[in-house]
Amino acid sequence: MAYVTAEAQQNLLAEVARAIDAIGAALAALGTAYELVDETTADRLEAELFRPVQIAYGRAKRTHDGFAERHGLAVGSFPPATPPAPSHGVKPLIEDAVEDVARADETLSELQDSLLPVEVGDQELRAGLAEVRELLGEVRGRARTFTRTFGR
């Protein structure tokens, strides 16, 4: 195993934090969309989109902070994202959330491809990143289905 510097560990944490911020932006967009729909549609939106993204957000934060604690680094501070204006409409808000989720997934994918998580020898980090990516991977298809049936 290669020697991993504190700078490399900080860079790894910064990339995970970048993904967390993108997931947080997706949550903000979905939260705004939730406020614009009727109760039945809101329940669907919560179950099909908001909850999986929220679980991924929580898991990503636990992964970030767990790694930081195990390596004596500062844990993250992740303030909620600013909600977008409701005037965008439900479908554009969901599309924005999907783009944010894709950005987060791409960030984590590039991090995994860099092999840095393997080099640090932290199995919990690798498992956490894989779990977050699995949760995020389902969002695009669920959003497509949701928006296709929205308003029917």
Image (cartoon, grey):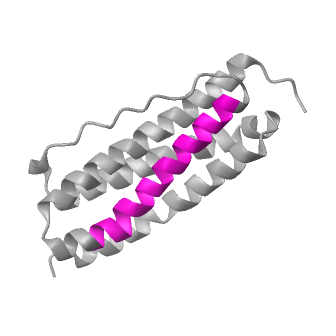
**In this rendering, position of residue 51 left or right of residue 72:** left
Q: Is residue 92 above or below residue 148?
A: above
Image coords of residue 109 (percent x, y): 61, 46
Nearer to us in this view, 53 or 152: 53
Magenta stretch holds residue 85? no
Instruction: From this view, report whether residue 22 is shown above or below residue 37.
Output: above
Q: Residue furthest left?
A: 87
List the single residue furthest toward the bottom.
152
Looking at the image, which is closer to me, 86 or 38?
38
- Left-right relation of 11 to 151: right
Residue 150: image quadrant is bottom left
Q: Is residue 143 visible?
A: no
Q: Bounds of the magenta span? A: 44-69
Secondary structure predominantly adopted by residues drawn in magenta:
helix
Residue 64 within the segment the image draws in magenta: yes
Q: Give residue 141's position: percent from left, percent from top.
A: 42, 69
Residue 101 can be seen in this image: yes
Whole-percent x, y for residue 48 in the image: 37, 70
The quadrant in which residue 75 appears is top right
Q: Quadrant of the C terminus?
A: bottom left
Q: Residue at x 19, y 76 (%)?
A: 40
Is residue 7 found left or right of 102 in the rendered image?
right
Q: Residue at x 15, y 58 (%)?
A: 35
Quarter in which the N terminus is drawn: top right
**Residue nearest the viewer, comparing 71 with 85:** 71
Does residue 102 appear to the left or right of 27 in the view shown? right
- Residue at figure coordinates x 48%, y 66% from the top left: 138
Q: Is residue 59 above or below residue 46?
A: above
Residue at the image point whose x is 16% and y is 72% from the top: 39
Place of residue 126 in the rendered image (x, y in percent of width and height, measured from the top left): 71, 47
